[in-house]
Image: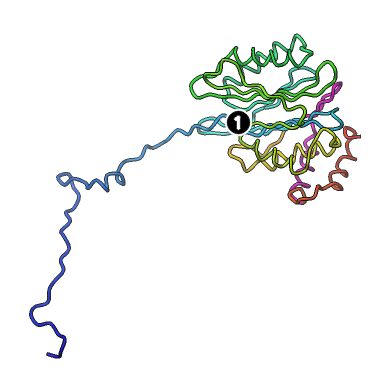
C-alpha cells in the first residue's frame, strides 16, 4: 500500500431504522402538527370598520361633500349594496363605519331625533349621545358616526362619534375648523391625500368635489374598501347626489393624472363646465 493509506476493513455508516407509520406505531410529535386534520370550512370575521367614509368643507364654507364606498362585508361574503350616506334632514347627513347592528339602530334613533329639526350644534351632539346610548355596542362591536351639516346660523360642522363596549357615552370630536374628517379602514389614506393637496374650507367647489372622489379612490387599497363610490353635495339650501358620469370622469382623471404631485386643474375644470351644479 502507498503511504497515507488506512489498513483494515472499511467502516460503514448506518442510518437508524425508521419504522413505517401505522396503527401500532405512534406518530412522532413533530409530525403530529403536520398530519392534523384541518377543518373543512373556517368562518372569517371581517372587522366592522372596513370602509372609507369622508366629508370635507369647501367653497368658502358653503358646501360639504361626503363620499363613501358601498361595500358590505359579513362573514363569508361581500356585496356592493350598502348606503353609507344617510340623510337626517335637508341640512344634515350621517356616514357610518363599524358593526352593522349598532350602526343601524343608532341611525334610526338619529333620524327620529332629527325629525324634530335640531338647530344648534349642541342639540346635534346631544342627539348623537342619545342615539349611541339607545343601542349600546356588545361583545367586540364598535362604531363610528360622521355627522355633517349646517347649523341655524349657516355654519358648517363635522362631528365624529366613536364608541365601543364599555363606553357610557360616545367620544365626540369636532372637525369643522379643519374642514376634513374620515372614518373606516381607509381613513388615514384619505386624509393623507387631502392634506397633500391642502384641501380646506376655501377650496373651490369643483376642486372639492374632485378631491372627495380622489381621496376615496386613493384609499381603495385599504382592507375591505369597495370600488363603487357614492358622493353627495350639501349646501344650506340644497342637496344633490353627484352623477355617476361625473364620478367616472373624476376617476379617469385620477388614474391618468391624479396620482401626480400637481393638482390636475385643467381636466377637472373641463368636467365642471359640463354640469350646472358646479356653475
In this view, the residue farthest toward the top is: 116
Occupied quadrant, residue 219: top right
Q: Residue visible at 65% across and 41% down?
A: 220
14 to 252, vertically: above or below: below
Q: How many numbered marks, from 0 up?
A: 1
> x, y percentage for residue 20?
18, 53
The magenta region covers 231-256
In this view, the residue farthest toward the front is: 177
Along the viewing direction, whichever of 128 and 87 lies nearer the viewer: 128
Occupied quadrant, residue 102: top right
> x, y percentage for residue 267?
85, 47
Is 234 covered by the magenta stretch?
yes
Q: Secondary structure at mark 1?
A: strand
241 to 108, vertically: above or below: below
Q: Which residue is mark 1?
A: 72
Q: Classify mark 1: residues with Cα within 10 Å, few (<14), some (14-19) or many (20+).
A: many
Residue 92 placement, left or right of 279: left
What colouring style does the render use?
rainbow
Q: Residue visible at 90% across and 34% down?
A: 276
29 to 74, vertically: above or below: below
Q: Say which quadrant the C terminus sits in.
A: top right
> x, y percentage for residue 275?
88, 36
> x, y percentage for residue 81?
64, 29
Along the viewing direction, whichever of 227 and 198 lies nearer the viewer: 198
Along the viewing direction, whichever of 97 and 170 lies nearer the viewer: 170
Amino acid at each position: 500500500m502507498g503511504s497515507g493509506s488506512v489498513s483494515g476493513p472499511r467502516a460503514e455508516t448506518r442510518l437508524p431504522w425508521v419504522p413505517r407509520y401505522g396503527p401500532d406505531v405512534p406518530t412522532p410529535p413533530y409530525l403530529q402538527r403536520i398530519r392534523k386534520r384541518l377543518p373543512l370550512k373556517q368562518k372569517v370575521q371581517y372587522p366592522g370598520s372596513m370602509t372609507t367614509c369622508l366629508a370635507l368643507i369647501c367653497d368658502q364654507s358653503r358646501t360639504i361633500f361626503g363620499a363613501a364606498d358601498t361595500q358590505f362585508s359579513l362573514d363569508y361574503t361581500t356585496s356592493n349594496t350598502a348606503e353609507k350616506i344617510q340623510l337626517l334632514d335637508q341640512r344634515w347627513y350621517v356616514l357610518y363605519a363599524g358593526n352593522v347592528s349598532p350602526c343601524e339602530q343608532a341611525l334610526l334613533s338619529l333620524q327620529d331625533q332629527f325629525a324634530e329639526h335640531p338647530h344648534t350644534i349642541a342639540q346635534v351632539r346631544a342627539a348623537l349621545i342619545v342615539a349611541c346610548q339607545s343601542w349600546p355596542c356588545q361583545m367586540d362591536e364598535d362604531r363610528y358616526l360622521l355627522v355633517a351639516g349646517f347649523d341655524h346660523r349657516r355654519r358648517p360642522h363635522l362631528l365624529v362619534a366613536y364608541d365601543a363596549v364599555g363606553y357610557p357615552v360616545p367620544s365626540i370630536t369636532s372637525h369643522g375648523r379643519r374642514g376634513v374628517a374620515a372614518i373606516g379602514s381607509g381613513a388615514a389614506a384619505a386624509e393623507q391625500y387631502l392634506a397633500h393637496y391642502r384641501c380646506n374650507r376655501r377650496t373651490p367647489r369643483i376642486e372639492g368635489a374632485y378631491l372627495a372622489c380622489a381621496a376615496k379612490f386613493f384609499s381603495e387599497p385599504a382592507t375591505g374598501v369597495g370600488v363603487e363610490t357614492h358622493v353627495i353635495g350639501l349646501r344650506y339650501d340644497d342637496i344633490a347626489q353627484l352623477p355617476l358620469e361625473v364620478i367616472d370622469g373624476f376617476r379617469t382623471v385620477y388614474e391618468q393624472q391624479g396620482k401626480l404631485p400637481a393638482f390636475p386643474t385643467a381636466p377637472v375644470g373641463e368636467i365642471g363646465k359640463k354640469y350646472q351644479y358646479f356653475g
